[in-house]
Image (tube, grey):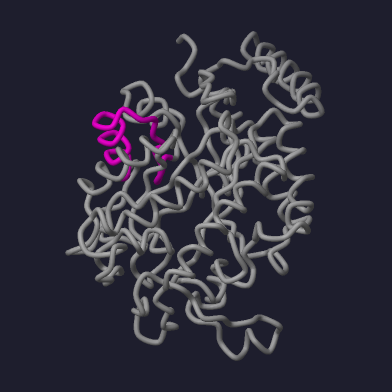
Amino acid sequence: MGQPHLFTPLTIKSTTLSNRVVISPMDQYSAVDGVVNDYHLVHYGKFAMGGAGVVFVEATGVSEVGRITNGCPGLYTDEQVAAFRPLTAFIKQQRSIPAIQIGHGGRKASTQRPWEGGGPVSPDEIAKGDRIWTPLGPSDQALAEGWLTPKMMDSADLQRTKADFAQAAARAADAGFEIVEIHMAHGYLLQSFLSPLSNRRNDGYGGDRAGRMRFPLEVTEAVRAAWPDDKPLFVRISSVDGIDGGWELEDSVALAHELKARGVDVIDCSSGGNSPKGATNANLKRGPGFQVPFAQRIREEVGIKTMAVGLIRTPQFAEEVLADGRADLIAVGRQALVDPFWPLHAAQYFDIDPDFTKWPQQYAWWLEKWDKGLRAYEAEQAAE
């Protein structure tokens, strides 16, 4: 076959992706005081070595109270910026693009790490050094019974949080990131403004869809102004709440039009999250590519690049999505945890890297000799 779509470069603004494989942001809850460490360097570094076109760092808090857990990274101090620089430098060294998702936990902030239960911080975690804080939200409505009740954001909270997003974007550029993604999904702050399930305000930031979109769009404008003009801006959305009475795909199409008008380059199409049952839970039938139709519809109706995510596990299926014009990028998450070298294995599947040139040079010279030896042995066996 010719060059697969999966390995066709894509230029967005001044940034050229060597392929269409993106490592999706996946929270690791392993930062200390919002500062990344050696764990993160190894964790994200291996995805860059594995050949992904883009490596996304997990949801990173724009403020201390914007972190989801005590273990989430942040971008609100100079120390945090400095800690990210070795990570972004290594990703670039491996011919990948470093990207970061910035967000605010909203009413889902100040919670436990998932392996601790995922609910409100307990006395056990506090005894170990974790802290608890009052979350913020569009309304003073807790996510579920037993969860912390958020403070309904007033005008000062809105202005400060908008400034926090802008400052985090500027810090991301200083830290060496080439792509910023605004987290507007999964029940966190910005998505909770969008959804009628969580936004019960009766001022200019609530009510009808236009009112509910107002604050997320103001944040987008602030980030776009703070983020370099020539660098791509992504937004991850929950395309649907997947809950009766919630945000629907038609709403996402309307939102995508507004985001495009404000300089957003790519819509990352996820779903769900307005539930205590995990970040992305929704009442959707889950199967390979179950969220691809969201990316396809937004791409077709809005004329904006989209990223498809959700149980895209094989190179064949990823290629089909791109070849059919249903999305421009493929986000791989848990499959990359299982196989960090998924992109390089995909290149082998399509037989476009017989000499291992896409692999790190330190690996390639070993693997080329290994492959020649295997082929020679197989030829000898076949001749006998």
Left or right of residue 328: residue 338: right
Give the answer, above or below, for where 306 lies relative to 160.
Answer: above
Task: Please provide the residue range marked out in magenta.
Answer: 290-312
Give the answer, above or below, for where 77 lies relative to 13.
Answer: below
Q: Nearer the viewer, residue 316 or 298?
A: 298
Q: Residue at x 67, y 49 (%)?
A: 171
Quarter of the figure with residue 354 = top right
Give the answer, above or below, for where 318 lies relative to 80.
Answer: above
Q: Would you say residue 335 is visible in this rendering? A: no
Left or right of residue 236: residue 170: right
**Rendered location of residue 164, percent (x, y):** 57, 59
Q: Nearer the viewer, residue 14 or 187?
A: 14
Examine the structure image and report whether residue 297 is included in the region drawn in magenta.
yes
Examine the structure image and report whether residue 355 is included in the region drawn in magenta.
no
Q: Residue at x 41, y 40 (%)?
A: 312
**Rendered location of residue 118, percent (x, y):** 49, 74
Q: Quadrant of the N terminus?
A: top left
Left or right of residue 189: residue 126: right
Task: Please count the marks in the image.
Answer: 0
Q: Would you say residue 355 is visible in this rendering? A: yes
Quarter of the figure with residue 343 = top right
**Rendered location of residue 355, percent (x, y):** 69, 15
Q: Quadrant of the C terminus?
A: top right
Q: Residue at x 36, y 76 (%)?
A: 143
Give the answer, above or below, for where 202 lies relative to 60.
Answer: below
